[in-house]
Image (spheres, rainbow, N blue to C red):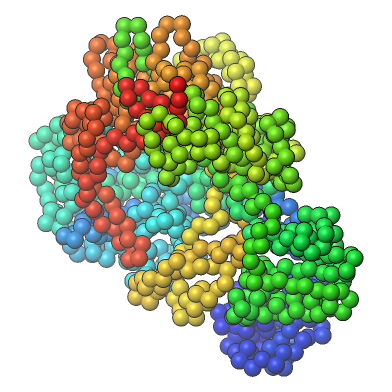
């Protein structure tokens, strides 16, 4: 059989891994024969012949590869490309640079700008909840568009029911238990703009069949919150017989972030525009004619389809938050005496959501295209990825940000321990290693250790990197980094060992035989251990304003953009200090980096500085044992018990030493020789300028506008040009300001989800040495869903292409230091703090954080003219405060993370206030949508959540003190 596969474009599932001939089963007969032309080690003579045969394009497998005779590296060759491989050099799988492997350092590189001519389809599902609480898709609306589409308004009304839809799509008077599908095309549009409607038990099937038949060349389908709802439900239908091919999916826990099936790509607009659909018109400036309505979802039951009569009661609209509830109540009062036509309102509600989504996404995409020339919904799957593309493409200088994996190289640490032990016990310090004089060369290659006196070569073979047959018995599996079968890599390792043995004394240790021999080699520093979140802490359980004491609630203007613009960041790759244990406080102060240290806190610091992760919580205390045991009595522990051992950034450590912390020892230090203040300043300034210019100046005279622009330049160092109100541009600028730095900290060990449709594919994944399968579930009629993680020491060693944990470490560290500056000035007057905000008591003449509207300044959260009169907290993210309006009336605000504050809960606010002040608990009813990933179904779960105080970060009385505090 001739080699007819176009290997550069696809890989046949049953092809031989060597000759690439489909169905040849070459490995069944293993009598290896090496090709003298390309160097490929074929399974047998037939395999050798197969790889020589030319395909229809006149190329053979032999023409497409070259195997190095020295190191065995397999190089894929394009048409007319001569072999470029040099021993010791390879193309980096992360940054794609061809470089010397021993010295290569990865840097973040810009992605290619992705383009697509595929049309966009915007869609929305409406569901009802059956007797088993499962959500069933019953109505689907979809709309397409392009830049040539005519204006939406005025939209013609239906001649049948008067609704805001085409008469052909009208469902008024229809039996909604029966299937109905219609699609209206607007022929006056260049794209043949379509509005699709399908209702009935098979509406989701009709929608997908319409997509795949009308858009045979592909399309991008977008739903708002589709990853958690619409697309998730569609995946369930696809796996139960609707899909022609297996879907490609990307999950984040149970959220379907991306899906592609039958050339249709599904994305979630919520991942780019993180607001509710009802906020689209105002946030994006879509005008007043597009307004999201409300619909009585609880009333949507089969027995009510076709209902015509009075409007439903407000409880049919579900458990809305207070403001939404009040708005609906006011609207329903105005509908008194009006007729509610279920079918008409049902379709108008769903179609209006679709059109709001379409107009919002179109405007968002145009704004992104104008700002940076990228296609928003093509370039990435999330706003974080899009912001990273914008930064790396438009603002990042080359070779600035290193690709720094979250995890250290464990295997090389084992090798260092073994070599250090032998150097100390057998070779009298003569060994040349990476840690001692640099690796020596033998037979043209670097070796792990070399003793020139006895001509001894020491080799530590990592099982994964050298294809160990004991640990990886399936030798036909391709090595994910070297693109060769594991068997071939092992054979090459053995060949080179035999070659070394002809001239040197050779000692080899395989990783699986390694035992820790107690060599004095420090574990490599884990940079991710210095990555802490924001500081959220309750200091005083209850406070009230008096005639002389005010309560203030302030937060920082754009805290993280402030840090990105003004604070110091590392450039390049870190240097690991060879002798950190010799450093004292003064010597450590010379370095900018991340250090693992043992440090003794002071005994009487009211607001400690250094964070510690205790029982999965971020705690700021003065004694390790007190924090671990939540000791409420005065600390009596020894210095050894009080001492903290952890990893922190050096800016935080320098501040800690100023506050009275005492450095005991430095265990590891990663430092940077090059730093830069304002590494992200150009990015921040660009979007800060867009935000300020688009905020507008309604009614402002030209001289006042000029004064405003001059003032802004003085405060921010950014010169404004055209100040004109543009809500959409302002919104885009605002979310880009806050969406960049977190992507650098993305974990590189995330769980991947794959859907397989054959036994062979399933078995291949189960036996893949580079991954660890977590679960394997049958799903749908003929599919399996696999969840797996990279196996570290395997392919998982490959870093995420934007990985730079230190960026996140220094961003959050600088942010905590900026918050601490305010906390330190306020002292015992602090009541509550949360990442970028602080609540405190204030009397005339006392210190307050500097107020203003510029980056890094503090603004009031309480509306102008109002005053906070009471603040009560039950712990982090749990508080209630009371505000007095200028007319003397009062209103309260209740915040409780994880609990939706409905009108029913608000009616119990006095009871909740009592719990916040004096303890106790109460169960509050909550309704949640629960997704089942294995079946791709959604159910409504009625449950109770416990409302109670959680005061575990300090020792509380009338005020509070940190754990470990001594007078």
Q: Residue at x 84, y 69 (%)?
A: 456
Say which quarter of the image contains residue 625: top left
Q: Residue at x 79, y 64 (%)?
A: 426
Whole-percent x and y of residue 450? Answer: 83, 65
Q: Residue at x 77, y 58 (%)?
A: 424
Q: Residue at x 81, y 55 (%)?
A: 436
Task: Using the image as rendered, state which of residue 566 and residue 665 is in the foreground.
Answer: 665
Whole-percent x and y of residue 402? Answer: 69, 47
Report if residue 302 is visible in the image. yes
Does residue 672 sit above or below 466 in this rendering?
Answer: above
Report if residue 38 is visible in the image. no
Picture quarter with the N terminus: bottom right
Whole-percent x and y of residue 949? Answer: 29, 34
Residue 554 lies left or right of residue 23; in this view the side is: left
Task: Using the image as rendered, state which of residue 836 and residue 801 is in the foreground.
Answer: 836
Task: Using the image as rendered, state which of residue 802 and residue 576 is in the foreground.
Answer: 576
Residue 738 lies left or right of residue 402; in this view the side is: left
Does residue 568 sit above or below 60 in this rendering?
Answer: above
Does residue 35 sit above or below 637 in this rendering?
Answer: below
Whole-percent x and y of residue 566? Answer: 63, 28
Picture quarter with the C terminus: top left
Residue 571 lies left or right of residue 531; in this view the side is: right
Residue 525 lies left or right of residue 223; in this view the side is: right
Task: Using the image as rendered, state which of residue 655 and residue 640 is in the foreground.
Answer: 640
């Amino acid at each position: 059989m001739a080699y007819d596969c176009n290997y550069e474009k696809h890989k046949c599932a049953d092809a031989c891994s060597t000759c690439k001939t489909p169905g040849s089963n070459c490995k069944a007969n293993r009598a290896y024969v090496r090709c003298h032309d390309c160097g490929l080690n074929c399974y047998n003579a037939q395999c050798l012949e197969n790889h020589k045969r030319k395909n229809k394009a006149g190329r053979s497998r032999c023409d497409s590869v070259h195997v190095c005779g020295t190191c065995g590296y397999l190089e894929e060759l394009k048409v007319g490309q001569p072999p470029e491989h040099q021993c010791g050099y390879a193309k980096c799988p992360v940054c794609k640079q061809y470089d010397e492997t021993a010295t290569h350092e990865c840097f973040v590189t810009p992605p290619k700008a992705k383009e697509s001519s595929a049309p966009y389809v915007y869609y929305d599902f409406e569901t009802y909840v059956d007797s088993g609480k499962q959500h069933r898709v019953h109505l689907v609306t979809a709309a397409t568009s392009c830049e040539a589409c005519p204006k939406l308004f005025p939209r013609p009304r239906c001649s049948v029911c008067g609704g805001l839809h085409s008469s052909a799509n009208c469902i008024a008077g229809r039996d909604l238990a029966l299937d109905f599908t219609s699609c209206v095309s607007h022929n006056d549009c260049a794209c043949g703009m379509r509005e699709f409607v399908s209702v009935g038990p098979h509406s989701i099937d009709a929608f997908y069949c319409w997509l795949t038949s009308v858009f045979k060349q592909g399309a991008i389908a977008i739903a708002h919150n589709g990853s958690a709802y619409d697309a998730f439900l569609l995946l369930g239908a696809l796996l139960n017989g609707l899909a022609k091919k297996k879907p490609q999916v990307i999950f984040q826990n149970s959220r379907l972030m991306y899906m592609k099936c039958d050339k249709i790509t599904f994305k979630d607009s919520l991942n780019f525009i993180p607001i509710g659909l009802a906020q689209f018109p105002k946030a994006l400036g879509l005008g007043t004619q597009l307004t999201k309505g409300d619909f009585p979802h609880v009333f949507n039951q089969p027995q009510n389809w076709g209902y015509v009569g009075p409007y439903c009661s407000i409880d049919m609209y579900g458990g809305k938050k207070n403001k939404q509830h009040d708005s609906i109540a006011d609207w329903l009062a105005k509908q008194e005496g009006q007729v509610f036509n279920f079918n008409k309102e049902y379709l108008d509600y769903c179609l209006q959501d679709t059109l709001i989504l379409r107009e919002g996404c179109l405007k968002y995409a145009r704004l992104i295209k104008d700002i940076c020339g990228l296609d928003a919904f093509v370039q990435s799957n999330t706003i974080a990825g899009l912001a990273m593309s914008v930064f790396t493409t438009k603002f990042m200088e080359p070779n600035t940000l290193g690709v720094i994996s979250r995890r250290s190289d464990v295997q090389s640490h084992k090798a260092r321990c073994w070599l250090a032990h032998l150097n100390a016990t057998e070779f009298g310090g003569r060994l040349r290693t990476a840690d001692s004089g640099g690796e020596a060369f033998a037979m043209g290659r670097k070796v792990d250790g070399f003793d020139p006196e006895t001509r001894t070569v020491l080799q530590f073979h990592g099982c994964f990197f050298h294809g160990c047959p004991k640990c990886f018995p399936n030798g036909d599996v391709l090595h994910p980094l070297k693109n060769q079968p594991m068997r071939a890599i092992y054979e090459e390792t053995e060949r080179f060992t035999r070659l070394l043995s002809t001239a040197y004394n050779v000692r080899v240790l395989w990783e699986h035989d390694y035992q820790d021999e107690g060599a004095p080699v420090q574990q490599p520093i884990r940079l991710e251990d210095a990555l802490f979140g924001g500081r959220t802490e309750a200091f005083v359980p209850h406070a009230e304003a008096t005639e002389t004491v005010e309560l203030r609630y302030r937060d920082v203007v754009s805290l993280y953009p402030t840090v990105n613009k003004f604070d110091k960041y590392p450039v390049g790759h870190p240097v690991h200090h060879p002798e950190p244990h010799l450093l004292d406080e003064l010597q450590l102060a010379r370095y900018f980096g991340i250090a693992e240290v043992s440090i003794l806190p002071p005994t009487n610091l009211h607001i400690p500085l250094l964070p510690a992760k205790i029982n999965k919580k971020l705690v700021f205390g003065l004694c390790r044992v007190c924090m671990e045991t939540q000791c409420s009595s005065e600390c009596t522990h020894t210095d050894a018990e009080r001492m903290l051992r952890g990893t922190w950034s050096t800016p935080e450590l320098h501040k800690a030493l100023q506050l009275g912390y005492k450095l005991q020892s430095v265990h590891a230090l990663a430092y940077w020789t090059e730093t830069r203040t304002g590494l992200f300043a150009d990015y921040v300034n660009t979007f800060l300028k867009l935000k300020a210019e688009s905020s507008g100046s309604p009614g402002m005279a030209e001289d006042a506008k000029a004064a405003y622009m001059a003032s802004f330049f003085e405060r921010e160092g950014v010169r404004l040009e055209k100040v004109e109100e543009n809500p959409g541009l302002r919104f885009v600028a605002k979310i880009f300001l806050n969406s960049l730095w977190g992507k650098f900290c993305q974990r590189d060990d995330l769980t991947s989800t794959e859907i397989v449709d054959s036994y062979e594919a399933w078995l291949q994944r189960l036996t893949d040495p580079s991954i660890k399968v977590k679960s394997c579930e049958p799903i749908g009629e003929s599919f399996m869903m696999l969840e797996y993680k990279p196996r570290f020491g395997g392919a998982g060693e490959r870093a995420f292409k934007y990985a730079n944990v230190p960026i996140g470490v220094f961003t959050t560290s600088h942010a905590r230091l900026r918050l601490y500056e305010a906390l330190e000035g306020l002292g015992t007057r602090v009541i509550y703090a949360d990442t970028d905000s602080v609540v405190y008591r204030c009397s005339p003449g006392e210190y307050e954080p500097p107020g203003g509207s510029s980056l890094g300044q503090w603004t009031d959260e309480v509306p102008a003219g109002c005053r906070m009169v009471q603040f009560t907290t039950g712990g982090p993210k749990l508080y209630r405060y009371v505000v007095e309006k200028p007319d003397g009336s009062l209103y309260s605000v209740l915040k409780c993370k994880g609990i939706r504050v409905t009108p029913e809960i608000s009616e119990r606010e006095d009871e909740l206030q009592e719990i916040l002040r004096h303890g106790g608990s109460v169960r509050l009813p909550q309704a949640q949508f629960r997704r089942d990933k294995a079946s791709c179904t959604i159910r409504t779960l009625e449950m109770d959540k416990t409302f109670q105080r959680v005061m575990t970060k300090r020792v509380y009385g009338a005020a509070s003190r940190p754990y470990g505090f001594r007078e």
